[in-house]
């Protein structure tokens, strides 16, 4: 019996493929739901290993501390609000955000927490409003209609220039991918040995079919396809 392919080995959930979550900063979520105006001050901006965006530590007037994805241009000492003015980094309902504003951390439904546009440089644009829905243009150029009570943050997530800096050494790339439990390096199945993957083996051979029977002991590729 050959070894498990990497995809199946990761699915088992062994310690080799576990994410180093003990090093993660915090879960990104909105701190509380309120209809009143609450103001907070940016205490610090930190580098989170689990994200490609920096996190801003915000302390509110009521003593609650919260980590927010820092938008481009936010600095220590700035003031943000919840349900206040649509300033940089503030969290408001979509119905209170002017059309044409760039937003991120958009909720899918009221109270779901930020679901859309969370990575560096990704943002949505409020393009239209009606009585029962708000239209938001996503980075994929798809327009979705959301509940007006859904919340979002104003601005563009910082850190989108990180892709411009190349990885000059293989070790730098390894540690960057390992911090987020990403599979790297990626080896082509046809370059593996036969014991490691069903498509591995001798390099000089005709192209092998990627279709496999549903009764096969090791399934990779198109499993029991209806059409060939």
Image (cartoon, helix red, strand yellow):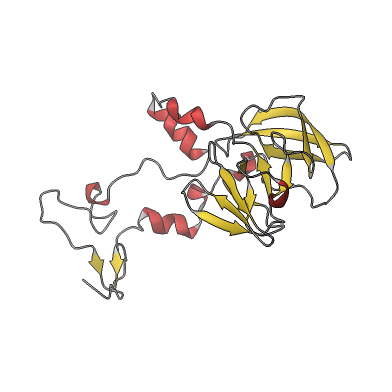
Please tell me which residue is depicted at 52% across the width and 42% down the height of the picture: 180
Q: Determine the residue positioned at 59% across, 54% down.
A: 135
| Place of residue 59 in the rendered image (x, y in percent of width and height, measured from the top left) | 81, 35
The spot of residue 126 in percent (x, y) is: 60, 47
**Position of the C terminus by quadrant:** bottom left
Name the one closer to the observer, 3 or 68: 68
Q: Residue at x 69, y 36 (%)?
A: 89
Q: Is residue 5 above or below residue 213?
A: above
Q: Is residue 45 above or below residue 117?
A: above
Which quarter of the figure is the N terminus placed in?
bottom left
Q: Is residue 226 left or right of residue 45?
A: left
In the displayed structure, 208 sits above or below 182; it is below
Q: Position of residue 6 (x, y in %)?
A: 38, 53
Residue 110 position within the rendered picture, expressed as x and y whole percent measured from the top left: 70, 58
Task: Give the residue displayed 67% in from the left and 59% down from the top.
Answer: 147
**For residue 77, side relative to residue 120 (left or right):** right
């Amino acid at each position: 019996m050959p070894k498990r392919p990497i995809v199946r080995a990761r699915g088992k959930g062994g310690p080799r493929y576990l994410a180093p979550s003990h090093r993660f900063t915090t879960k990104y979520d909105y701190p509380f739901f309120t209809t009143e105006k609450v103001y907070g001050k940016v205490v610090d901006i930190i580098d989170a290993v689990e994200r490609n965006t920096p996190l801003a530590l915000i302390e509110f007037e009521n003593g609650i501390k919260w980590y927010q994805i820092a938008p481009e241009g936010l600095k220590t000492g700035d003031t943000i609000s919840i349900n206040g003015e649509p300033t940089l980094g503030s969290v408001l309902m979509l119905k209170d955000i002017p059309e044409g504003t760039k937003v991120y951390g958009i909720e899918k439904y009221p109270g779901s927490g930020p679901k859309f546009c969370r990575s560096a440089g990704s943002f949505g644009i409020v393009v239209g409003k009606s009585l029962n829905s708000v239209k938001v243009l996503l980075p994929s150029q798809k327009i979705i209609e959301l509940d007006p009570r859904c919340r979002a943050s104003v601005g563009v997530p910082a850190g989108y220039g990180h892709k411009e800096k190349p990885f000059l050494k293989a070790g730098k790339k390894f540690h960057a991918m390992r911090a987020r439990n990403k599979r790297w390096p990626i080896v082509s199945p046809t370059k593996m040995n036969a014991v490691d993957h069903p498509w591995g083996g001798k390099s000089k051979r005709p192209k092998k079919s990627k279709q496999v029977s549903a009764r096969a002991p090791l399934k990779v590729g198109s499993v029991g396809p209806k059409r060939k």
